Amino acid sequence: MNQQTYGVAFTGSGSAKLETVLTNEQMTRVVDTSDEWITTRTGIRQRHIANVTDSIRSLGGEAARQAIASAGLEPADIDLIILATSTPDDLFGSACQIQHEIGAARAVAFDITAACSGFVFSLVTAAQFIRTGAYQNIVVVGADLLSRLTDWSDRRTCVLFGDGAGAIVMQRCETGDRLLSFEMHSDGSKNDCLNAAYKHESAPLVDDITIQNGQFTPVDMNGREVYRFAVKRVPEVLEKSLFHAGISTDDVDWLILHQANQRILDAAAQRLGIPAERVVSNMANHGNTDAASIPIALDEWVRTGKIKAGDTLALSGFGAGLSWGAAILKWGQ
Ligand code: ACO
């Protein structure tokens, strides 16, 4: 058996530009809320909403194209596309649509559904294919249009979410492995704290056969329970990952958490002893974009020159499942 393993490098990033902005003031005309409540409880000031002609295919494709170009590759170089999404254009999967959209004709493509942990879980999955030597060039896309799954009459949830898409390129690397460590966890016993579940309805079909004839319901969340889960599990999983990477919080240049709530970001950073200036936050501008939130934030920090080649990044995604995970990596070729 071939025991050779290869290293992983993180070589490009991209994100889609969504023109339509929905402000907190506008939200006050949708539900009984206020800019003051949303800002102080979450840090969100506005979110971006997909236009009616946008799709996971178009926005995920835009992010993927940018990431591929910034890695100095062509779509034809890509071996694998992994799409993290909970809001596909097609329940059978949207990764193949992105593959076609960007002309990555050689690539195999599939979706991973793990809500706000989806991007970290997909990144870790991609790394396994590179380490074993199966694939060289992989695009990981995080794209979600939560506006599709939002109950716009529920003020407890609708003020939190936005739409977006981000992507990174991961490549085989001959010198060292830039994925220093990772952790992934699930706790299905708390699934009912946060879900967009299939609601069972039954209908008679023929003779004594009854079929399921329900539909998926909008996002339902026990906010306090999820908040408690996040502020406990996120620092814990990052501490473990840093330990396995053999580094300390002092070595982390940027902490990039799933952008769920500024108070969660602040609490996690405080517990880890990471100062605010090293915590990436675009909450105010985007709200919670589910699987897209980490790659969008990462791309914004790369494009504005804050994240530089060689920087150590600590990523953590958490949310529905419940699920949570972390990845410690060095950015760049
Ligand atoms: N505007 C005004 N008042 C509101 C709003 C609103 N938009 N939403 C809730 N309230 C009210 C409630 O009705 C309640 O009023 P009451 O005390 O009279 O009953 C009060 O505000 C407090 O409500 P809580 O739900 O307890 O508010 P909390 O301080 O917990 O903040 C929040 C809610 C922001 C949702 C917080 O719990 C949170 O961020 N939780 C974590 C969310 C998260 O991390 N999700 C992660 C992943 S998402 C995914 O995976 C798709």
Image: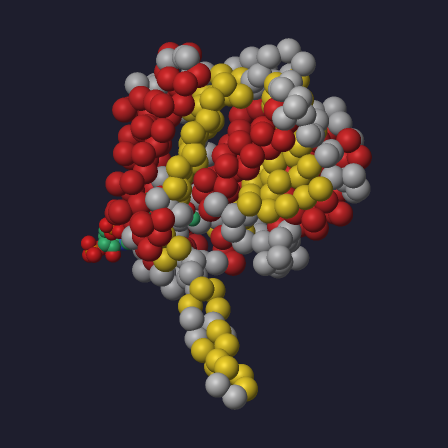
Q: Residue at x 74, y 47 (%)?
A: 101
Q: Quadrant of the C terminus?
A: top right
User: From where the camera sits, is residue 168 visible?
Assistant: no
**Which corner quadrant of the image does residue 198 belong to?**
bottom left
- The x and y percentages for residue 9 are 62, 20
Colour mapping: secondary structure
Q: Residue at x 60, y 43 (%)?
A: 83
- The x and y percentages for residue 112 are 55, 45
User: From where the camera sits, is residue 224 visible?
Assistant: yes
Q: Residue at x 36, y 57 (%)?
A: 220
Residue closest to the eye, 242 or 57: 242
- The x and y percentages for residue 14 are 63, 33
Residue closest to the eye, 50 or 226: 226
Q: Is residue 25 above or below residue 299?
A: below
Residue closest to the eye, 188 or 117: 188
- The x and y percentages for residue 154 are 36, 61
Q: Is residue 262 above or below residue 56?
A: above
Q: Quadrant of the N terminus?
A: top right
Q: Is residue 329 above or below residue 210?
A: above
Q: Residue at x 40, y 48 (%)?
A: 320
